[in-house]
Amino acid sequence: MNAPMGLRERKKQRTRETISDTAITLFLEHGFDQVSVVDIAAVAEVSKPTLFKYFPTKEDLVVHRFADHQTVSSTVVAERPPGVSAIDALHQHFLDGLAARDPITGLNDDEDVLAFHHLVYSTPSLVARVSQYLAQAEEALAQALVDALDSDREITAALLAGQVIATERILASVNWQRIVAGRSADEVYPEAVADADHAYALLRQGLAGAAAQK
Amino acid sequence: MNAPMGLRERKKQRTRETISDTAITLFLEHGFDQVSVVDIAAVAEVSKPTLFKYFPTKEDLVVHRFADHQTVSSTVVAERPPGVSAIDALHQHFLDGLAARDPITGLNDDEDVLAFHHLVYSTPSLVARVSQYLAQAEEALAQALVDALDSDREITAALLAGQVIATERILASVNWQRIVAGRSADEVYPEAVADADHAYALLRQGLAGAAAQK
DNA sequence: CAGATTTCTTAACCAAGTCAATTCACAGAC
DNA sequence: GTCTGTGAATTGACTTGGTTAAGAAATCTG
């Protein structure tokens, strides 16, 4: 059951994938800054303006893969089962991501995923673009939380959204560091779950229940 | 008591200020994207390479003013008086900022500050650069918190740092929105203090003490 | 003032991204 | 199957941010 699209649509889809795959392959081989967009266009057999019609910037050739994640957290909150709190839904969703070795959690030791991660996080302009996506995710989550939280203060939703996005970013970063250190995802998994539980406890109970202070 | 610098140093200082002031003036007049660096260089009476020797990117002509803030939070934690917890020190420092109408808190209705703020936050590439500074501030704060927190988990410091930076960013944004809506800093001040207290309570006690959930 | 050094300018260059005009290829009607 | 209109691709030129090399100018040391 294919989607009902003509030859034109299918060709556009294929061209888009060809361009992106070509770009990522070249970037992984020689580094983001060492490959120019004309190089990519040449290998992908399109012209430069065509390339920029499919991807607005050079960075988007890589990070368009993060585009979907913009709305994941807000969707998790908006479509959580009745009786489940927003924070529980987000917590559970992150645990599910860990169990499924979702690359977004940092807990994935697949060679290609590692290489892609390294490409992104070793290139400042790509990091910058990713954090733009995170900012959008935060905004969407804040919106979803306004409805989900029974607070008299609207600012609570924005604050919690900021904290959740920061938390998941840091959890992923810690997992990723362990994987880069050479350990397997299966080996790290229990620690990753413990960290996630700890982090979400911090959101629920705050510092009061998590760390004595000097 | 002037710093002991020769004519060369003084001239460099003056040139740097001239370039930045010229740039910001032109940006405020015509918009960031409508002014090219050669325009700026021409008005400031320097060559383009000289401009880029003083400021690595066009964005830095504006946001170099944020450079100092990179280390403020970490310094507050590292140099807090004995007997004061890290979170209390950060909380108090933010309250001091509000009382002093520090632009970084968003609670400042000075015409020039407003215009500058608007320039930055209405220009995507400037926003991106600012968030890079925030990321550095977060990293520095995480480092300072490793020593300040009496936690068995090192990840707690990173998580808290992320949450603090996100919190202060959002508090500033909310204050800024109220000022933009036409209200005076003095009028908004009590709400700003209440929000800050609320936000830091969220960090201390978490959602448990802040908001019932549907 | 003379010599060493740092800084500035000039001019050319590269890469990202845009634009206008033309050509190409698919879609639908006959 | 051919014609025709439309959306997409190409070409080539252009703008702008940012860099580099060589030489000229200004500052510092003595």
Image (cartoon, coloured by chain):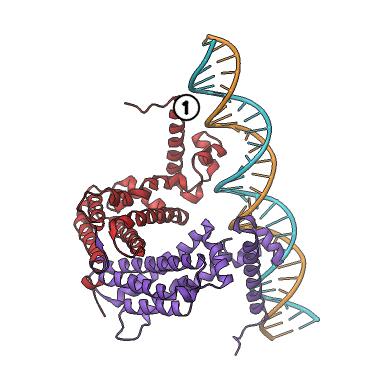
Chain colours: A red, B purple, C cyan, D orange
Residue drawn at x 42%, y 66% is B169
Residue B108 seen in this snapshot: yes
Q: Quadrant of residue B81?
A: bottom left
Q: Nearer the viewer, residue A207 or B161?
A: A207
Using the image, name the chain to which the residue with label 1 belongs. Answer: A
Q: Quadrant of residue B33?
A: bottom right
Task: Please provide percent x and percent y for residue B159.
Answer: 31, 66
The correct choice, above or below, for A143 with respect to B22 in the image is above
Q: Nearer the viewer, residue D22 or B101?
A: B101
Residue A181 seen in this snapshot: no
Residue drawn at x 57%, y 39% is A49
Task: Please provide percent x and percent y for residue A202.
Answer: 25, 66
Count the labels in the image.
1
The correct choice, above or below, for B207 with respect to A132 in the image is below
Label 1 Cα neighbours within 10 Å, binned few <14 / some 14-19 / many ≥20: few
The correct choice, above or below, for B188 with respect to A47 in the image is below
Residue drawn at x 43%, y 74% is B71
Q: Secondary structure at mark 1?
A: helix
Q: Quadrant of the C terminus of chain B?
A: bottom left
Q: Quadrant of the N terminus of chain B?
A: bottom right
Task: Please provide percent x and percent y for residue B77.
Answer: 36, 78
**In the image: residue B180, left or right of residue A64:** right
Residue drawn at x 42%, y 80% is B96
Residue extending furthest bottom? B1
Q: Nearer the viewer, residue B96 or A196?
A: B96
* Kind of residue indicated by mark 1: Arg
Q: Nearer the viewer, residue B130 or B15?
A: B130
**In the image: residue C24, left or right of residue A94:** right
Task: Please provide percent x and percent y for residue B179.
Answer: 50, 68
The correct choice, above or below, for A25 with respect to C7 in the image is above
**In the image: residue A111, left or right of residue A129:** left
**Circle 1 residue:** A8
